[in-house]
Image (tube, rainbow, N blue to C red):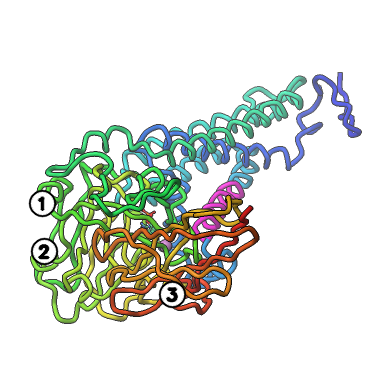
Amino acid sequence: MAQVEDIRGVAPDEVHGEASSWQPGWAKGLAGALAAALALGVAELLAGVIALVPSLVTVVGDGVIDVGPPMLIDLGIALFGTGDKTALQVGTVVLAIAAGVVVGLLAARRFLYGVLGFSAFAVLGVVATAAAPQASPVGAAIGAVAGSGTGLAALWVMLRQLGQHREEPVREASVDRRAFLRTAGVAGVAALGAGAVGRMLASSDELSSQIADSTLPQVATGQPTPPPGTTVEVASMPPLYTPNSDFYRIDTALTIPRVDVTNWTLSVNGLVDNPTSITYDDLLAEADMESDVTLACVSNEVGGGLVGNAAWFGVPLARVLERAGVQPSGTQIVGRSVDGFTVSFPTEIALDGRDAMIAVGMNGEPLPARHGFPARLIVPGLYGYVSATKWLQDIELVTDDFDAYWIPRGWAKEGPIKTQSRIDVPTDRTQVQAGTVALAGVAWAPTRGIERVEVQVDEAEWVEAELAEALNVTTWRQWVYRWEASAGSHRVKVRATDAEGEVQTDELAPPRPDGATGLHTITVEVV
Ligand SMILES: Nc1nc2c(c(=O)[nH]1)N[C@H]1C(S)=C(S)[C@@H](COP(=O)(O)O)O[C@H]1N2
Ligand SMILES: [Mo]
């Protein structure tokens, strides 16, 4: 018996009738969109579970950067600022879903179009991977085929519920609206769930067994112990060596790159006489430089936490450069990551005697995934954005013309770390008891070193704080001032003087373009 759809929404259990009774275009488009979303979700889930499988969204997004019209990409950066990587990935997902709508509409006419559409999706994923140096094409194929297959199957089920692609002539019971909506809901939830779980797993710090399997030669294992005298005896002070798990993390990577060290090599190329490739085993065998270096982010606000200190372990960069034979025109060193991020700094900085290195170890452990496993650059005295490439893949010698990742985005080309000091104890706006109060913190000026730290309470004279021994000139130095505090609300300021006699400026500057300045100031309530 033929019925017409109840358009007021009292859905009959089943709408019987001709195929045309309930199969609006939007339902077919929705089926295609959900199928595409499910395909992406499944691919992301596999990327999270199987280390070999890359995130197709990331890989395709990065492919867009490589081939996309520069104007569009610049527009994206202007609109989204530093979030352009996120925008790119969101854009990739939106485009894929839009393509899914078209495929859904076409597949409703002939399912062959669906098969072709999802095959194209899989091929695109694998092709984009070919352009991503560290991603495995086999892994990409697994993700792409499983994702497309699931998406295609879901499309088939939903279109069938919409009365499409039946072999026999459409009769009754061909349109199952309620079943379609149910399937659509399940597909949507599954797509979101799979995508979210995949992303979560992919950004977890566990790099399968790779890191556990890699052992560092000749290095003390575990968290380093500060030498006697290098710390102040004050409760709640941050440790002199920042544990890896507490070390700040800054990068443009939405998912932490997972590098398979069995087919990873570090290439040294560009304006050199002898371009070379170095394997992970080569690096481990050659690593003999251990150096304590404080790393700071240029985005760190005065008093902020985007700074940490670690014992790094690796291969001296100068040795690698010497072997490669830098040509006179190779005045800049570019460090490029497996995901295309770049830094650059003057070649002379790497050769001036500071402990610049290709680091494989951090605080007595192989580099954690989030801090750049298997190898990263560490250049004492430079902010991370111009020096500290994580997931390093490529060291290229270039001329001064080259601008690294953050330079066209409004940050200074040269990024020496500015002298800074911070009050860690007590924290801002804490209440303390009147009497002797320990004010304490850290000061850093790599590679100059810290000579003096002074404290000012309210408008009184600057007074000198006690300094713990310095580990070296490239690390932060702890300080303490024992203050006789009287009741009331007090403003406490700190300033450092570097070992060249230069006093930290009190002039306020924001992080952009070359690092914040100003004096860290807190309020202490003494009762
Ligand atoms: N591959 C890669 N390396 C990178 C970055 C990045 O975005 N990608 N960011 C840099 C910046 S801005 C900083 S401050 C340091 C931070 O290193 P961390 O995350 O180990 O603290 O990494 C640098 N290395
Ligand atoms: Mo940074």
Q: Secondary structure at mark 2?
A: helix
Residue 124 visible from this viewpoint: no
Q: Amino acid at mark 2?
A: Arg
Q: Quadrant of residue 161?
A: top right
**Nearest to N terminus: mark 3 or mark 2:** 2
Residue at x 28%, y 68% (from the top left corner)? 334
Q: CA distance from mark 1 to mark 2?
A: 10 Å
Q: Is mark 1 within 8 Å of ligand 1?
A: no
Residue 381, placed above or below residue 108: below
Q: Are marks 1 and 2 in contact (CB under 8 Å)?
A: yes
**Residue 348 against residue 494 in the figure, above or below:** below
Quarter holding residue 174: top right
At a point 25% along the width and 39% down the height, the residue shown is 222
Q: Which residue is the site of mark 1?
A: 286
| Disc 3 residue crowd, few under 14, some 14–19, many 20+, Cα 10 Å | many
Q: Amino acid under label 1?
A: Glu
Magenta segment: 83-99
| Residue furthest to the right | 8
Q: Which mark is residue 319?
A: 2
Q: Disc 3 marks which residue?
A: 514
The one of 302 and 247 positioned closer to us in this rendering: 302
Per the image, is 330 magenta?
A: no
Label 2 crowd bin: few (<14), some (14–19), many (20+), radius 10 Å: few
Q: In the rendered image of this protein, does residue 449 appear above or below residue 391?
A: below
